[in-house]
């Protein structure tokens, strides 16, 4: 029996979607369908029920999915055992990161990792924190790095480092001569924020709730999808915002933005998130160890 057929089936069964499986496996949807049909012919039974553009596992499909998971765990255990003997670290790692982390933290970290382990192919997916957690939950990626709390207790969450958020204004803004502000000081100005699902937006909303201030009191003028677009809008004098201090170092040096410390201070964790898997590829373990060491040796750099 072809391992490829079983791998394709397992991916479709995990995602319950031929389309998502095709994207994950970098295959066309007809090719995914063909592999699954071949496996069904091998077993002489249907593995999926297909109704109203939705699929579900048949009883036979559930058994094959259960055994295929155990088979792949054994493959991983065997691979790790051999690599431990040979000292080999190679393979493909799928990493996901929220926008702020992907733009400001991971380039240096992954660059140093590739220098040490050139045979590891690291592929990076970028989304907001909510999207990254969803990818981890569905095994689309091996490791996620996010900037907001993770509520799923079935995932392993490990804090990498703390990040401070500050208010930012243009140099010509009325608040530009202040060093420290409170949230209430920002309420009377147009506010520029990240999109729904953003870890930054979620952390700020939680911070305001803890202070007894409804996030709806902000005069929301724009929702933008990246730190770069927010910085550009604030520089243009279109409003105020709250961003990661690590994302504005260049602008502070150039004098195009002014940072205002928040009182009380607002900090959040950057965290690694992954599945509670008994066996992982050795490359994954090496990346986690490398990232932990990197965060300890660069505590103030994102």
Image (spheres, rainbow, N blue to C red):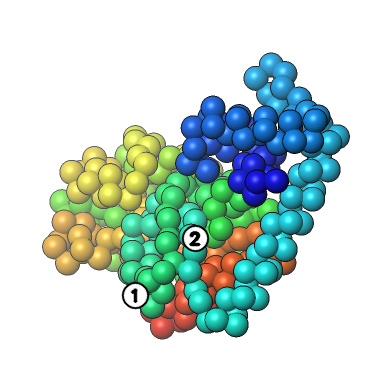
Residue 59 in sight here: yes
Q: CA distance from mark 2 to mark 1?
A: 15 Å
Quadrant where the C terminus sits is: bottom left
Residue at the spot x=50%, y=74% of the render? 89
- Horizontally, is 114 left or right of 199 in the view? left
Residue 285 in sight here: no
Location of mark 2 (residue): 93
Residue at the spot x=28%, y=49% of the render? 228
Residue 244 picture quarter = bottom left
Asked if residue 174 is positioned above or below residue 264 in the image, the reply reads above
- Horizontally, is 72 left or right of 102 in the view? right
The front one of 246 and 66 is 66
Contact between marks 2 and 1 (CB within 8 A): the answer is no
Q: List x then y, in percent, for residue 108.
A: 33, 69
Determine which of the numbered discs, if any, sits on residue 124 in the image. Answer: none
- Horizontally, is 183 left or right of 87 in the view? left
Badge 1 crowding class, 10 Å Cα cut-off, few under 14, some 14 to 19, many 20 or more, is: few
Q: List x then y, in percent, for residue 114.
A: 37, 70
The front one of 116 and 137 is 116
Residue at the spot x=65%, y=64% of the render? 76
Asked if residue 201 is positioned above or below residue 253 in the image, the reply reads above
Asked if residue 240 is positioned above or below residue 88 in the image, the reply reads above
Identity of the residue furthest to the top in this view: 52
- Horizontally, is 187 left or right of 21 in the view? left
- First in sequence: mark 2 vs mark 1: 2
Q: List x then y, in percent, for residue 251.
A: 20, 60
Determine which of the numbered discs, if any, sits on residue 115 in the image. Answer: 1
Residue at the spot x=33%, y=50% of the render? 227
Residue 106 picture quarter = bottom left
């Amino acid at each position: 029996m072809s391992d490829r057929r079983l791998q394709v089936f397992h991916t479709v069964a995990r995602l319950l979607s031929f389309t998502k499986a095709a994207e994950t496996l970098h295959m066309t949807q007809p090719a995914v369908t063909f592999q699954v049909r071949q496996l069904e012919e091998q077993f002489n039974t249907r593995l999926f029920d297909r109704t109203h553009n939705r699929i579900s596992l048949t009883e036979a499909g559930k058994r094959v999915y259960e055994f295929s998971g155990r088979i792949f765990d054994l493959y991983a255990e065997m691979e790790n055992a051999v690599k431990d003997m040979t000292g080999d670290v190679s393979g493909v790692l799928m990493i996901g990161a929220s926008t702020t982390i992907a733009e400001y933290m991971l380039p240096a970290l992954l660059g140093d990792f590739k220098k040490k382990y050139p045979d590891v192919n690291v592929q990076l997916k970028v989304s907001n924190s909510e999207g990254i957690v969803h990818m981890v939950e569905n095994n689309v990626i091996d490791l996620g790095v996010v900037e907001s709390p993770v509520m799923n207790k079935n995932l392993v969450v490990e804090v990498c480092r703390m990040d401070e958020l500050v208010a930012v204004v243009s140099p010509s803004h009325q608040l530009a001569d202040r060093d420290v502000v409170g949230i209430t000081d920002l309420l009377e100005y147009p506010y520029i924020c990240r999109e729904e699902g953003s870890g930054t937006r979620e952390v700020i909303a939680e911070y305001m709730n803890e202070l007894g201030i409804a996030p709806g009191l902000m005069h929301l003028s724009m929702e933008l999808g990246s730190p770069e677009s927010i910085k550009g809008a604030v520089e243009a004098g279109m409003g105020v915002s709250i961003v990661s201090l690590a994302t504005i170092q260049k602008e502070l040096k150039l004098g195009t933005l002014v940072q205002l410390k928040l009182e009380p201070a607002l900090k959040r964790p950057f965290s690694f998130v992954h599945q509670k898997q008994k066996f992982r590829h050795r490359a994954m373990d090496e990346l986690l160890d490398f990232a932990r060491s990197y965060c300890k040796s660069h505590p103030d750099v994102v």
